[in-house]
């Protein structure tokens, strides 16, 4: 009873979603958004008419003004610097715009332009000093803070009376200061527009990527050829411009040349940026983070004011928040990948039928023997990880290697080898089409082909994205084996969408249906997923009716058949439900049957572990990968099967001397060529009584 | 996880159980392949224990008999019993003391056959080591009260704690319990200063027993200690029949999996240490044990291992002899030193190996 419940719990509760959601980029903002909601609720409860329309309008207005400065500061933070002079720049630009509008009575657009230019110049001073002269950001902007403050004081002394005594009667000016459109203040609209533009800039435009790159790794950006100095300088300029924009709105709203404008603003701005999640060290930040941080900080400072908390206390609270935010930010940034890893592996319940006996009993079809002891070895020590092997019409042997290459061994003695093509990744399944182009599934890259004149061409590396998958499964992570249908369509397996090529053992531990079978049509270059939720689909072979494919599901130890054409189109039937090991590649034999490679053998301890998901999850968290219980991939064998699922023959290398691990075999002119992904050799086994003219080629057999 | 507080800490802060850590093999325990490369002195299936008699003959317990091993490696029968011999000791006067699982039989020269089957009201169950002390008594270790000797693996996975150390006085024919509640006692020794040592296998330590108390003499072994043997020049040899792995430690913490594994899986294929491994693909495999490019790395997590440690009389290891992962001579349950030669009994391979000590010391630069 408990067992059935446990089985249902693991089959139907999708706890792999937790890990997948956590590793999404937008998850980081979720925490901040939560903090914002809590803040809003707190102040809503404690402060009267917090959610009245007028209060919201005022909040939006002031928060947007603050938001501009935070945006500028964030750009500088993203680039890896810091700008402490924003408060002073704010003061100067405030005075400038007031002077231009009130005293000089310039047209508003001109006044704003002048102010922005002044802001840019102030920022440029920082930019030149820090970007080009390579001075320290903290110290430099602190010095400019003092100098600009002094300038602001001087200007204020000279102009304050003039400004206060003039009256401006401009409608535009009033609109900028206190106008609304659909009850949303003008400054909020401006911030929204500029914010969206900024988001597009940072995430979609090349210049924005340069900013993120310089902040992420200055040395690498320099090596890439980016103009690091210019990017840094321009970002300080941008900080000045954004501060100036904010000052324009502030001036329009208050019209006050006060002496204390912008004093202490840098602390609030820094707090807002860091609280939102913009990293102090650079390289990470977004407009959404700015918005969230600004809102939270503004609500807190304003709310504390409304609650009549004394100014000193409110500053202490703000400083503590800054401290807390900075500490948590660093901790989270360093440990995020660990937390994700902890949650990502979600083992599921996989119950397999009992292990078929392999004892050396003549009655058992899988009986152990050492037929593969007499295997000839090709390329010993010269080729590494030949997962699949194939031969062409003139008997040359091709195989993949873990260096991303297709290696060719020359007939008839296979002593001489050369690199036929270099693709990258780990080439896995191989197949020739009717024109003798070599199609390769490359693990980590996708479906490629090597033409007769050795050109490498990418066929496809993406497929249609499923609607409800959290992981972006439009990319191909582990294309495994393929076969070609009579009309040229290519059916290939993608073993898992949750793990990369080098992490495949973790997929073994999960035992989930993470894989799929995909069809690529070279006629219209369309890739579609035809079957989903398969448990590590591996080998694919076109069946004799040429309307269906046999495919292996490795961790499910089974072979199934899928019809892609004909009356049974779309159906999936089981061919063999329970093998004693994990099937890998399937290829055609000369007598109409099929060869299946078992890349490993089932063991009772591991089979039991597959029924204990909690055990596997704890094991994956507490033990290093070297210590995990693994499927036994040190021993493999080759089976010959027919479409009805009968086992016709079994070939073993009992001592594991020559071929401990087998992932693939190919019959060619009376010999069986054997490959293994953990081996450094290819085997050649003479098949007695096999058709000496049998050649696998797309023309005749598929 | 026993401690609820540490469990809570684990849930909140993550991290791993401290009990999963294993001491590394370094310093005096730095791995070599001396045992693997040593020449085979004698081989016979069913070897269980060896001992050197006071007159310099090498005796071996094999199957249900005790044999003298001749210099050419052949076996000459000395005595035969009705059950398998599980331990062997030769007393000062040349008398033979053997353990037959649940009984100890001593064939003395002048006082006939003495049989010991119980002590302090409890029957012997799994006698696995005998040691003749210099002052005429016989130390007996009874590994477990619940599992007979061949089922030591069951006792490990059941976290057995019923081992005893007994002392039998030849003169008075009385047996006393020196220590009880041991986590599988598998070897006893009385050193030149009269201190009595016992190896507590499941706790990976050797302890000194004095009166009613016992203290660890050396704890934190990276493996499971078995029998002792005296060493020339003071100190002793300790054989370690298998090494620890984090996976086994983990399985010991996982009650549900462990119980079901013991219930439905053949004991040969349990996640537990073994005397030998690599025979069958049904044995469990750990990630580090996967062969890459045809090579099994010697530092892979060991399902079986061969280890003998030479301790000084101060209970500090001086050097050690190993047979690493992938080797044949694993499951060292007993050693015996005769002059410059050390005879090492590998139960996993069914062989006695001869290690020439001066060469070894020179090779290890001691």
Image: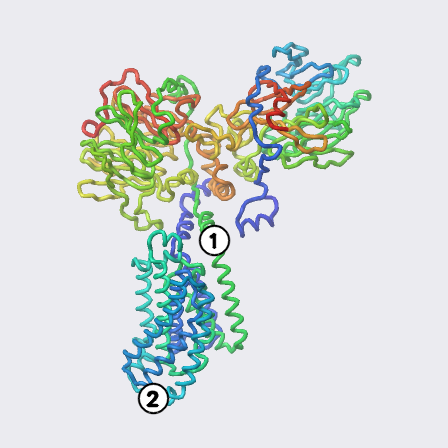
Q: Disc count in the image? A: 2
Q: What element does badge 1 sit on?
A: helix
Using the image, tell me which numbered label, if any, was put on residue A334.
1
Q: Position of residue A616 (x, y in %)?
A: 48, 40
The front one of B325 and B320 is B320
Q: Quadrant of residue A686?
A: top left
Give the image location of residue B309, x and y in percent: 64, 28
Q: Looking at the picture, how far across and down is residue A130, in whole percent?
A: 41, 64
**Mark 1, other Cα within 10 Å: few <14 / some 14–19 / many ≥20:** few
Residue at screen point 31% across, 46% down: A475
Examine the rendered structure and indicate whether residue B29 appears above or below residue B53: below
Query: Does A342 appear above or below A590?
Result: below
* Mark found first going from the N terminus, 2 or 1: 2
Q: A42 left or right of B232? A: left
The quadrant in which the C terminus of chain A is found is top left
Residue furthest out toward the right: B172
Quick check: can you spot residue A40?
no
Chain letter of mark 2 equals A
Q: Residue at x 43, y 42 (%)?
A: A348
Q: Which residue is more in the foreground, A469 or A424?
A: A424
Q: Are marks 2 and 1 in contact (CB under 8 Å)?
A: no
What is the chain identity of the residue bearing mark 1?
Answer: A
Q: Which residue is labeled 2 in the image? A: A167
Is any part of residue A54 visible from this angle? yes
- Disc 2 on helix, strand or loop? loop
Residue drawn 64% across the image and 11% down it: B70
Q: Quadrant of residue A476?
A: top left
């Amino acid at each position: 009873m408990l067992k059935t419940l446990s089985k249902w719990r693991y089959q139907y509760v999708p706890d792999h979603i937790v890990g997948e959601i956590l590793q999404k980029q937008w998850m980081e903002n979720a925490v901040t958004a939560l903090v914002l909601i809590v803040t809003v609720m707190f102040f809503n409860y404690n402060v009267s008419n917090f959610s009245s329309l007028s209060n919201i309008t005022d909040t939006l207005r002031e928060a947007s003004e603050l938001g501009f400065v935070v945006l500028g500061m964030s750009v500088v933070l993203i680039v890896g610097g810091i700008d402490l002079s924003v408060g002073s720049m704010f003061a100067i630009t405030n005075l400038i715009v007031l002077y231009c509008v009130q005293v000089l009575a310039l047209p508003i657009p001109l006044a704003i332009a002048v102010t922005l230019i002044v802001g840019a110049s102030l920022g440029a001073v920082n930019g030149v000093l820090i970007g080009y002269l390579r001075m320290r950001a903290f110290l430099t902007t602190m010095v400019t803070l003092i100098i600009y403050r002094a300038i602001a004081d001087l200007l204020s002394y000279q102009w304050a009376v003039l400004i206060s005594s003039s009256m401006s009667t401009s409608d535009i000016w009033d609109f900028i200061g206190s106008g609304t459109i659909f009850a949303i203040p003008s400054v909020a609209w401006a911030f929204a527009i500029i914010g969206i533009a900024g988001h597009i800039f940072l995430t979609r435009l090349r210049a924005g990527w340069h900013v993120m790159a310089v902040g992420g790794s200055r040395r690498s950006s320099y090596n890439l050829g980016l103009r690091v100095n210019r990017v840094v300088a321009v970002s300080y300029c941008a900080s000045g411009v954004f501060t100036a924009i904010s000052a324009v709105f502030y001036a329009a709203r208050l019209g006050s040349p006060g002496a204390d404008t912008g004093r202490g603003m840098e602390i609030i701005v820094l707090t807002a940026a860091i609280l939102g999640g913009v990293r102090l060290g650079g390289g990470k930040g977004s407009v959404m983070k700015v918005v969230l941080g600004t809102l939270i900080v503004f609500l807190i400072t304003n709310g504390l004011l409304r609650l009549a908390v004394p100014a000193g206390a409110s500053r202490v609270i703000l400083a503590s928040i800054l401290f807390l935010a900075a500490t948590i930010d660093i901790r989270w940034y360093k440990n995020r990948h660990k937390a994700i890893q902890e949650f990502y592996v979600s083992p599921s319940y996989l119950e397999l039928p009992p292990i078929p006996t392999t004892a050396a009993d003549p009655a058992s079809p899988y009986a152990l023997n050492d037929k593969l002891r007499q295997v000839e070895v090709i390329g010993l020590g010269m080729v590494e990880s030949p997962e699949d092997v194939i031969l062409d019409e003139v008997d040359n042997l091709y195989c993949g290697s873990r260096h991303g290459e297709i290696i060719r061994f020359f007939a008839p003695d296979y002593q001489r080898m050369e690199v036929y093509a270099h693709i990258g990744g780990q080439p896995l399944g191989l197949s020739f089409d009717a024109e003798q182009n070599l199609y390769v599934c490359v693990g980590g890259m996708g479906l490629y082909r090597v033409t007769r004149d050795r050109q490498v061409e990418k066929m496809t590396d993406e497929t249609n994205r499923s609607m409800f998958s959290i992981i972006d499964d439009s990319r191909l992570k582990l294309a495994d084996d393929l076969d070609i249908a009579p009309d040229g369509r290519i059916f290939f397996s993608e073993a898992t969408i949750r793990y990369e090529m080098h992490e495949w053992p973790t997929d073994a531990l999960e035992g989930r249906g993470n894989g799929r079978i995909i069809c690529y049509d070279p006629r219209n270059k369309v890739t579609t997923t035809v079957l989903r939720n398969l448990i590590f689909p591996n080998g694919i072979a076109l069946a004799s009716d040429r309307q269906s494919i046999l495919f292996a599901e490795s961790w499910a130890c089974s072979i199934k058949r899928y019809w892609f054409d004909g009356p049974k189109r779309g159906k999936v039937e089981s061919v063999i439900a329970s093998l004693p090991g994990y099937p890998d590649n399937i290829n055609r034999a000369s007598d109409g049957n099929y060869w299946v490679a078992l890349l490993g053998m089932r063991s009772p301890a591991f089979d039991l572990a597959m029924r204990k998901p909690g055990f596997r999850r704890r094991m994956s968290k507490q033990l290093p990968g070297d210590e995990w219980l693994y499927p036994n991939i040190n021993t493999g064998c080759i089976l010959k099967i027919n479409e009805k699922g009968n086992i016709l023959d079994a070939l073993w290398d009992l001592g594991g001397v020559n071929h401990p691990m087998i992932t693939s075999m190919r019959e060619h002119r009376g010999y069986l060529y054997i490959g293994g992904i953990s081996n450094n050799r290819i085997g050649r086994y003479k098949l007695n009584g096999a058709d000496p003219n049998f050649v696998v080629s797309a023309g005749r057999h598929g | 996880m026993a401690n609820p507080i540490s469990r809570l800490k684990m849930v909140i802060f993550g991290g791993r159980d401290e009990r999963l850590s294993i001491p590394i093999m370094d310093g005096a325990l730095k791995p070599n392949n001396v045992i693997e490369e040593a020449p085979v002195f004698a081989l016979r299936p069913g070897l269980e224990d060896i001992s050197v008699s006071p007159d310099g003959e090498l005796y071996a317990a094999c199957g249900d008999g005790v044999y003298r091993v001749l210099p050419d490696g052949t076996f000459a029968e000395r005595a035969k019993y009705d059950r398998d011999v599980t331990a062997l000791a030769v007393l000062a006067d040349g008398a033979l003391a053997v353990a037959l699982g649940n009984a100890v039989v001593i064939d003395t020269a002048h006082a006939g056959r003495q049989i010991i089957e119980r002590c302090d009201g409890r029957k012997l169950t799994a006698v696995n080591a005998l040691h003749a002390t210099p002052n005429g008594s016989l130390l007996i270790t009874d590994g477990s009260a619940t599992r007979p000797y061949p089922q030591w693996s069951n006792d490990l996975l059941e976290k057995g704690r019923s081992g005893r150390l007994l002392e039998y006085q030849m003169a008075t024919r009385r047996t006393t319990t020196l220590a009880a509640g041991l986590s599988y006692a598998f070897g006893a020794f009385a050193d030149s200063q009269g201190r009595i040592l016992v190896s507590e296998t499941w706790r990976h330590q050797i302890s000194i027993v004095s009166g009613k108390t016992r203290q660890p003499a050396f704890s934190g072994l990276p493996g499971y200690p078995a029998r002792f043997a005296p060493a020339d020049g003071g100190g002793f040899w300790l054989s370690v029949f298998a090494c620890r792995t984090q996976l086994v430690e983990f399985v010991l913490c996982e009650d549900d999996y462990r119980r079901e594994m013991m219930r439905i899986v053949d004991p040969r294929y349990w996640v537990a240490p073994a005397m030998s491994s690599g025979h069958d693909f049904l044995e469990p495999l750990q990630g580090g044990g996967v062969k890459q490019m045809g090579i099994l790395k010697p530092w892979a997590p060991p399902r079986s291992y061969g280890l003998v440690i030479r301790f000084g009389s101060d209970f500090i290891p001086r050097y050690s002899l190993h047979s690493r992962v992938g080797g044949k001579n694993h499951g060292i349950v007993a050693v015996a030193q005769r002059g410059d030669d050390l005879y090492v009994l590998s139960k996993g391979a069914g062989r006695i190996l001869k290690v020439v000590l001066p060469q070894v010391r020179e090779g290890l630069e001691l």
